[in-house]
Image (spheres, rainbow, N blue to C red):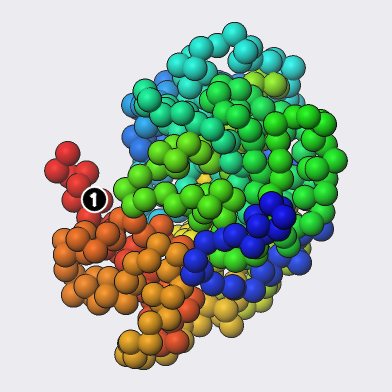
Amino acid sequence: MKALGLLRRGFEHGVHPAHHKQQTADLPIQRVPFGRDYVMPLGQHLGVPARPVVEKGQRVERGQLIAEPGGFVSTALHSPVTGIVKDVGNHRGVDGRFAPAIAIEADAFATQAIDAGATVDWQSMSLDEFITAVQMAGIVGMGGAAFPAHVKLSVPDGVRIRHLLVNGAECEPYLTTDHRLMLERPEALLEGAEIMRQKLGAEETVIGVEMNKPDAIDVLRRHITPGAPVRIVPLKVKYPQGAEKMMIKSVFGKEVPAGQLPRDVGVNVNNVGTIVAIADYFARGMPLIERVVTVAGPGVTYPANLVVPLGTPVRDVVKFCGGLRPGSREIIMGGPMMGRPIASLDVPVLKGCSGVLVFTEKETARQKEYPCISCGRCLEACPYFLNPSRLARLSRSRMFDEMKALNVFDCVECGSCTFACPSNIPIVQLIRTAKDDLMHRRESDA
């Protein structure tokens, strides 16, 4: 009866977009060949950009530290290849703007091997030492937000983490990176989860997986050691099931109040990719220098799940997949609901890049927008119980400050409102514009 109760439990609202995962769900992970040029932006994580510790002309080895954290909410960067630093300066980013980055030219004759046997003794570390190690390994949230992983480990006095929740929902359409990691690297996932659980002092590890991945659920269950404090919770297929607060509601039936964090209800949430990165560093000595990326969409010739060195130009990734099909019009970095279009094929793959999706004119054609009919569908879709239509109207009027009183920063930009709107109003884009303006002004005033 308890299991049935868990299956019935879920979060309110949300939407049901088509999955579109059949392109890559059954494709094993393969590795992209090393190219020549790599660009590592210093700000490819949330928080303060990293500070370079290398200079132009310097030779670097794969996995070598090239930038140190710029503050506590910041992470280190490591060279994705053995080669020569070609530049430390401004380079074009995903959004089209120029930002500080380190450009590296790979050594064509290097093996690009890394010492995979250099374990890091996490068991003898204090929690503070472990937090510093995670920060210096450059590990961030791999689901797309790129929030520094070590910050989540910093628990205030008096707060106890009872559950480590591993997010295996992967509710965004098209993306299958976490799915393939659960199928192909279950040992690493469980190893990384146990490291995190022990350092957090949590009672158990819970892995939440949407029920459209029954093979992943089966594989993980078969790899769990009998008696281990780990359990798998199958989740209803609904978007945005992978949002932290939604998953906590679905798994534990707990509501995380507005303005509070998962730790305030005794839960620490991490993405599957993040947990595997923890295992790769502490069990194999490899910092975050590469990640799995799903390349899919109607506009790509050969869809794939790929291990891609960070800093690799999207152009090289797409070329490996056979190039663009005729009629390709837009490339999204991330998923179709929360991802953003890239400014150029030459922008690099970042730590938070879970997908490179190529769409044709058919999928990207702008539908005619009609006036809001006050149908309330965006309110019914919003899992955070906001009023998206009102926020959109205020954004159009550039009344950004008034939006703060309506809890605009509680919006995670999941896109459910835009998906549900029958008038084709770009609600989430309008809200995103307002949040960007407010955050830039906050940074300028700081």
Pick the front one: 100 or 146: 146
The N terminus is located in which quarter? bottom right
Q: Position of residue 150 (x, y in %)?
A: 47, 29
Name the residue located 64 percent from the left edge and 41 percent from the top edge: 206
Q: Is residue 328 visible in the rendered structure shown here?
A: no
Q: Amino acid at mark 1?
A: His
x and y, in percent, of residue 332 in the image: 53, 62
The residue depicted at 56 percent of the width and 48 percent of the height is 252
* Vertical relation: 41 (above or below) 340: above
How many discs appear?
1
* 299 lies above or below 377: above
Residue 240 at x, y percent in the picture = 53, 62
Residue 229 shows in this picture: yes
Which quarter of the rendering shows the C terminus?
top left
Q: Tell me if residue 368 comes above or below residue 392 in the rendering.
A: below
Badge 1 local density, few (<14 within 10 Å), some, or many (20+)? few
- Kind of element beneath mark 1: helix
- Residue at 34% x, 34% y is 48
Percent position of residue 205, x then y: 64, 35
Instruction: Name the side, left or right, on which 235 lies relative to 350.
Output: right
Q: Which residue is drawn at the image coordinates 46% and 28% (left, top)?
A: 160
Q: Mark 1 highlights which residue?
A: 440
